[in-house]
Amino acid sequence: MDSSGRPVLYSYFRSSCSWRVRIALALKGIAYDQEPVNLLKDGGQQFSTEFQAVNPMQQVPALKIDGIILSQSLAIIQYLEETRPNPRLLPQDLKKRAQARMISDHIVSGIQPLQNLTFLKQVGEKMEWAQHNITCGFKALEQILQHTAGRYCIGDEVSMADLCLVPQVHNAERFKVDLAPYPTITRINKALLELEAFQVSHPCRQPDTPAELRA
């Protein structure tokens, strides 16, 4: 936390992992300050000595809050859920709670890492690689959501799974993935983007968003 007592989020406007946390902070009404970390400028500001002291993994997001520093988006979201439980992001029903965690992990572990900046630097055909892995993941996710979804990923309440879904759909659009075969994913994403918390946290509305990408 800074001298004002507000949490500090180390974030990059386009980072889907950072976006998840921004949504959680917005939904829970937590005021915070942002410290932008440009993943491209100067060879990647995440590799600086200064930021390595914040997060030795040299990744965003990181959140200074309550006298500690947390990294990894789901760990941060679950800490916020446990310390600031309203509105809740994990369903009360244990089966639905498990499903929310399952979908979150499906995206966070099974799809997003295969098309993030660090990984894409190691492969040749970046666009084809990203499209292939997002498509494989979305085929499975569409089937899962057909059994769990209402208006959102888990019934009619926003959950942690939704915080993971929207940034991943945004990534799919960036990589020009055809979303027509995934009507459930598309419908849920559209409904979520109507919510203020998803709008204010959007990559096009961040302090470090380049002028040409602002909305």
Image: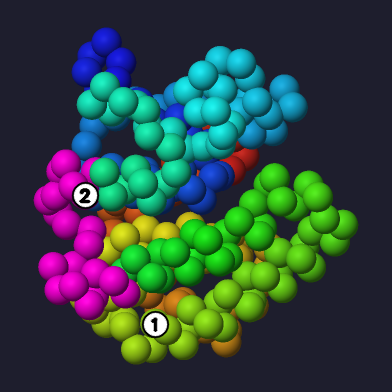
Find disc 2 in the rendering and name its residue: 81
Alpha carbon of mark 1 to alpha carbon of mark 2: how far?
23 Å
Instruction: Give the residue at x 56% y 83%.
Output: 139
Q: Amino acid under label 1?
A: Leu
Q: Quadrant of residue 191?
A: bottom left
- Front residue of 198 and 164: 164
Left or right of 70? Residue 212 is right
Q: Position of residue 46 (x, y in %)?
A: 61, 28
Magenta span has 128?
no
Left or right of 82? Residue 10 is right
Instruction: Give the residue at x 37% y 58%.
Output: 163
Left or right of 108? Residue 197 is left
Q: Answer few, some or many: residues within 10 Å of disc 1's Cα (few below 14, many 20 plus, some between 14 and 19).
A: many
Q: Position of residue 43 (x, y in %)?
A: 74, 27
Instruction: Give the residue at x 23% y 26%.
Output: 66
Find disc 1 in the rendering and name its residue: 145
Q: Answer few, some or many: residues within 10 Å of disc 2's Cα (few below 14, many 20 plus, some between 14 and 19).
A: some
- Front residue of 92 and 198: 92
Looking at this rendering, what residue extends furthest in the right direction? 124
- Front residue of 151 and 164: 164
Q: Amino acid under label 2?
A: Glu
Range drawn in magenta = 80-99
Q: Quadrant of residue 171?
A: bottom right
Q: Position of residue 12 (x, y in %)?
A: 53, 36
Q: Position of residue 100 (x, y in %)?
A: 31, 69
Please tell me whether mark 2 sits on a helix, a strand or a loop.
helix
